[in-house]
Image: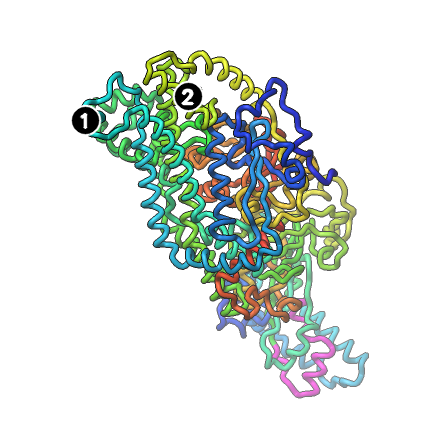
């Protein structure tokens, strides 16, 4: 980690307190060969430096003096002013320089002049007094350009002073100085195609199989079921594609001019074409398998093929969570506990040759 | 879609082939006397072994082979659900039908099978060692057969004064009988292990399919496949000779592509002479390798057509000079096999499952070398010697004016050769004119015309009533006949338009121009980067596998020799498509999806 900045691939356990839970998780996944969209964290040191440079303590003391936490209007007014102040305060010059440099680097990696990013707060530690308010911290999507990134980071910082978190600290007598925030800046995925994958076959529980559902554009349609996705089965050991069912995909979720995801109808060749190449299918299967090995249980992942990244590194993991349906059942057991002797087994096989049913 | 194929009795002789029945043993023909039985069965054309019209004598090995298979299923081992395979010849083509065992007999058969087959599985390696001795002895006996012309006068010492009491005329007939006996014995040996090998393989296969319903067939094959296999040895020898040529500075000698010229250059140096000696050493037995299935006398055999191995060696030399590494990475192949096994084992649910998995895999690996290797010893090596001996006999008749070409002997049925031999013996003994020279030339011409007409006929893939489900294990394993392929035949083609379905014999997806060839003689037409489309491929085509992108065949299953070899050479392959050579034209762009068994004309 250089001063204030940690790229995901530079993460190690010792940095967790400095970069927060979200950044730690993204860093851990990157390190485990689970390629999340690239990005970096702006450490808590950046917040501290900027806070001190702008003498935020003095402003807080002034605006919070005599705050009546039962007076909703007053809380809303004072906290609003604090947030506006933080969102407008100058950043520490070194912090700002580092942030702009890092954003430029991310643009370079994405072959873009102003790559759209997500800017999210990353809660620092669980014993932090306001850990339970982490969900209220802000997230900004489709942020483009260095100025906008700097702006979004300040607004994330400002989200430390939501009405509820501020009142909580006042009531409990916690120091406002005790809360700090790290911020994650991560490339927004512009998917060519996206979808989900299971590290077993959801239709029969076969654990040698990775099942992939895929459609053009954003994965929303696959997740919600609004698109009939292409379906691929891949063998986990040989990475052979053992089944491909290409569906007619009647809609595509894509980005409109104002960076919002919307649904457009799809027809003709594109609707009927496979939304993944064989190489992409194999890369997704390998990604899902790595996730399964990393988390040591069957996984249900969301993935995307990013238009901005180079072939070979454009399959990114958006989310990985344990698979819940088949994982609760026991896997197929061919012996079923009853171990036939070899000859009886051969006789049984000859009487019922399984391979007469070609899949 | 029809629910049955035409009856064998509805199929007419091709034009110009009237009277074709005379060419084959009466018992191998469909006949009114057995019509009820024959009409009730399901007959499929065995294009894996006999893709083209048989000549009369060649049908001998067909009859010997299938009858021996049956005998092992029924009289030796009592494979519980399966009796033998019945066979017929129709319009010159081989048709087979699996005969199920009567339901009521199965229980009694199980006990016998467990005892008899169990003994073989328990003692496999010892019995297989014995087999290797037996088969080599058999080849040696075949080699000793001599069809030299009968002498003007018998040897005074060896025949007359020795008190032997028999002469050359008797001996030449005895030798022909011996050739037939050895050919039948060969086919007895062939099936001593094969059905059992498939049974053990199927058992492991069934276990894997139960544990992992979606496991690709080829993953199972990869776990079992041997690393060093005799069937690949001929190709290994070509590579070794190519290396030797390059290392000895002899590469230039192969530049002309002409065997005579190359040999002239080689004979001019010590290194070259040493290379020729090394070639000859490899040739026996490894170049007794047929360019076809080995079941036709017309298949070319490397050792008799040295331009074939020379051409392959020349290609390998070019590759070596371009810096290519021809060696098979044995360590990497072993490591990959171990990885595959370990990863699947890890996916099993319980330790009992893992134990059963290892046990079945162990047995499959014990039996599999036979499945892989016997093909070289039987269909290639032994058959090569049989064809050579028969040609020697044919040549003898040429000298006696019976016919014009040594190969004409194959237009006689095996019993007719005995008759001709007696004719010759009688004419020699008397002496008096033989009847043959005025009998056979016209008859052979008539048969040649018929055979040409039969060859032009496209055999119907199946006849009669297909069973609901195909369960006979060997039919599925070896011939690739499945419930799916039968319904595809009934539909008259593949699945969707421009799509052919078959067995996913070897993985991978490629696109490229097709090269359709119908016989081994056309191998040289195959160009770099093409996809080979053929009725079937032989293991001896392996040297061109470095040139082509994929293989598509009309016939064959997962375990057909073509499939084994394609997997070994990492070449995508779809076998058993039924219609590839009649649907695809040379130059068509096609996509071969060896993982899913689909061929698409683009």
Q: Which residue is mark 1?
A: B161
Q: Quadrant of the N terminus of chain B?
A: top right
Point 63% across, 71% down: residue: A328
- Residue B444 image offset from top left, x and y in percent: 49, 17
Q: CA distance from mark 2 to mark 1?
A: 30 Å
Label 2, secondary structure: give it: helix
- Residue B575 image offset from top left, x and y in percent: 55, 39
B565 with respect to B4 (left or right): left
Chain of residue at mark 1:
B
Front-lying residue, B541 or B305: B305
The relative height of residue A317 versus residue B273 in the rendered view (above or below) is: below
Colour mapping used in the image: rainbow
Q: Pointer 1: residues within 10 angstroms few (<14), some, or many (20+)?
A: few
Front-lying residue, B295 or A283: B295
Segment colored magenta: A154-179
- Residue A267 image offset from top left, x and y in percent: 77, 42
- Residue A160 belongs to the span the image colors magenta: yes
The relative height of residue B577 versus residue B204 in the rendered view (above or below) is: above
The relative height of residue B286 versus residue A24 in the rendered view (above or below) is: above
Q: Which residue is mark 2?
A: B420
Q: Quadrant of residue A83?
A: bottom right
Confirm whether residue B531 shows in the render: no
- Residue A32 belongs to the span the image colors magenta: no
- Residue A23 image offset from top left, x and y in percent: 57, 67
């Amino acid at each position: 980690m250089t001063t204030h900045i940690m790229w995901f691939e530079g993460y190690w356990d010792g940095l967790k307190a400095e970069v927060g839970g979200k950044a730690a998780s993204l860093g851990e996944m990157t390190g485990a060969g689970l390629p999340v969209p690239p990005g970096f964290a702006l450490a808590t040191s950046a917040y501290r430096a900027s806070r001190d440079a702008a003498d935020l303590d003095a402003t807080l003391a002034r605006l919070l003096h005599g705050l009546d936490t039962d007076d909703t209007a007053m809380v809303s007014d004072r906290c609003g002013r604090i947030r506006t102040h933080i969102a407008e305060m100058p950043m520490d010059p070194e912090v700002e320089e580092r942030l702009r440099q890092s954003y430029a680097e991310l643009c370079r990696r994405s072959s873009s002049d102003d790559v759209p990013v997500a800017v999210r707060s990353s809660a620092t530690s669980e014993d932090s007094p306001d850990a339970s308010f982490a969900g209220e911290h802000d997230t900004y999507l489709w942020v483009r350009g260095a100025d906008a990134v700097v702006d979004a980071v300040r607004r994330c910082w400002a989200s430390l002073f939501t009405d509820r978190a501020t009142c909580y600290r006042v009531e409990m007598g916690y120091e406002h100085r005790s809360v700090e925030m790290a911020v994650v800046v991560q490339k927004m995925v512009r998917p060519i195609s996206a979808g989900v994958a299971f590290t077993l076959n959801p239709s029969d529980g076969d654990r040698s199989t990775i099942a992939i559902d895929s459609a053009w554009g954003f994965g929303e349609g696959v997740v919600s079921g609004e698109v009939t996705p292409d379906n691929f089965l891949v063998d986990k050991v040989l990475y052979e594609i053992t089944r491909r069912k290409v569906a007619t995909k009647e809609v595509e979720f894509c980005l409109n001019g104002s960076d919002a995801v919307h649904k457009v109808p799809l027809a003709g060749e594109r609707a009927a074409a496979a939304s993944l190449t064989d190489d992409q299918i194999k890369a997704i299967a390998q990604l899902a398998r790595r996730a399964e090995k990393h988390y040591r249980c069957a996984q249900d992942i969301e993935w995307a093929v990013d238009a901005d990244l180079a072939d070979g590194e454009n399959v990114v993991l958006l989310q990985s969570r344990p698979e819940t349906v088949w994982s609760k059942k026991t896997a197929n057991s061919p012996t079923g506990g009853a171990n036939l002797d070899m000859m009886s087994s051969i006789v049984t096989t000859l009487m019922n040759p399984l391979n007469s049913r070609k899949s | 879609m029809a629910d049955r194929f035409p009856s064998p009795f509805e199929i007419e002789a091709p034009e110009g082939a009237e009277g074709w029945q005379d060419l084959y043993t009466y018992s191998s023909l469909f006949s009114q006397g057995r019509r009820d039985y024959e009409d009730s069965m399901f007959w499929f054309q065995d294009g894996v072994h006999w893709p083209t019209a048989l000549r009369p004598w060649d049908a001998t090995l067909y009859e010997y082979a299938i009858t021996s298979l049956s005998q092992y299923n029924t009289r030796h081992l009592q494979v519980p659900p399966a009796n033998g395979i019945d066979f017929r010849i129709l319009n010159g083509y081989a048709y087979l039908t699996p005969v199920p065992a009567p339901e009521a007999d199965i229980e009694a058969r199980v006990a016998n099978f467990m005892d008899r087959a169990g003994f073989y599985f328990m003692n496999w390696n010892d019995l297989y060692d014995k087999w290797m001795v037996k088969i080599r002895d058999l080849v040696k006996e075949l080699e000793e057969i001599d069809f030299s012309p009968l002498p003007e006068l018998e040897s005074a010492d060896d025949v007359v004064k020795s008190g032997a009491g028999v002469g050359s005329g008797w001996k030449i007939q005895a030798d022909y009988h011996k050739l037939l006996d050895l050919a039948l014995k060969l086919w007895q040996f062939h099936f001593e292990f094969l059905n059992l090998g498939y049974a053990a393989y199927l058992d492991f296969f069934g276990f894997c399919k139960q544990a992992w319903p979606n496991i690709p067939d080829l993953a199972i094959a990869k776990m079992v496949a041997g690393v060093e296999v005799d069937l690949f040895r001929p190709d290994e020898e070509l590579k070794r000779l190519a290396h030797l040529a390059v290392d000895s500075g002899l590469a230039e000698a192969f530049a002309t592509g002409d065997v005579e010229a190359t040999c002239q250059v080689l004979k001019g140096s010590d290194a070259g002479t040493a290379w020729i000696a090394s070639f000859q050493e490899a040739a026996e037995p490894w170049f007794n390798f047929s360019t076809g299935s080995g079941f036709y006398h017309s298949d070319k055999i490397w050792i008799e057509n040295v331009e074939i191995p020379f051409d392959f060696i020349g290609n390998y030399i070019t590759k070596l000079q371009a810096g290519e590494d021809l060696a098979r990475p044995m360590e990497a192949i072993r490591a990959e096999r171990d990885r595959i096994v370990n990863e699947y084992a890890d996916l099993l649910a319980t330790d009992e499952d893992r134990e059963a998995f290892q046990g079945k895999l162990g047995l499959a690996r014990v039996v599999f070398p036979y499945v892989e290797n016997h093909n070289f010893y039987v269909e290639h090596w032994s058959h090569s010697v049989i064809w050579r001996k028969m040609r020697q006999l044919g040549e003898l008749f040429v000298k006696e004016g019976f016919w014009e070409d040594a190969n004409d002997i194959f237009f006689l049925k095996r019993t007719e050769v005995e008759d001709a031999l007696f004719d010759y013996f009688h004419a020699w003994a008397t002496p008096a004119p033989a009847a043959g020279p005025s009998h056979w030339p016209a008859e052979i011409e008539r048969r040649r015309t018929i055979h040409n007409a039969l060859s032009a006929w496209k055999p119907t893939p199946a006849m009669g009533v297909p069973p609901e489900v195909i369960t006979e294990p060997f039919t599925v394993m070896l011939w690739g006949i499945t419930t799916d392929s039968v319904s595809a035949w009934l539909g008259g083609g593949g699945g969707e338009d421009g799509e052919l379905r078959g067995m996913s014999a070897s993985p991978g997806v490629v696109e490229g121009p097709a090269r359709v060839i119908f016989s081994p003689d056309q191998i040289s037409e195959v160009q770099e980067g093409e996809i080979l489309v053929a009725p079937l491929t032989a293991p001896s085509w392996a040297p061109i596998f470095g040139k082509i992108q994929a293989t598509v065949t009309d016939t064959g299953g997962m375990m057909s020799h073509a499939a084994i070899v394609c997997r070994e050479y990492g070449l995508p392959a779809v076998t058993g498509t039924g219609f590839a050579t009649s649907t695809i034209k040379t130059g068509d762009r096609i996509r071969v999806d060896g993982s899913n068994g689909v061929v698409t004309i683009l």
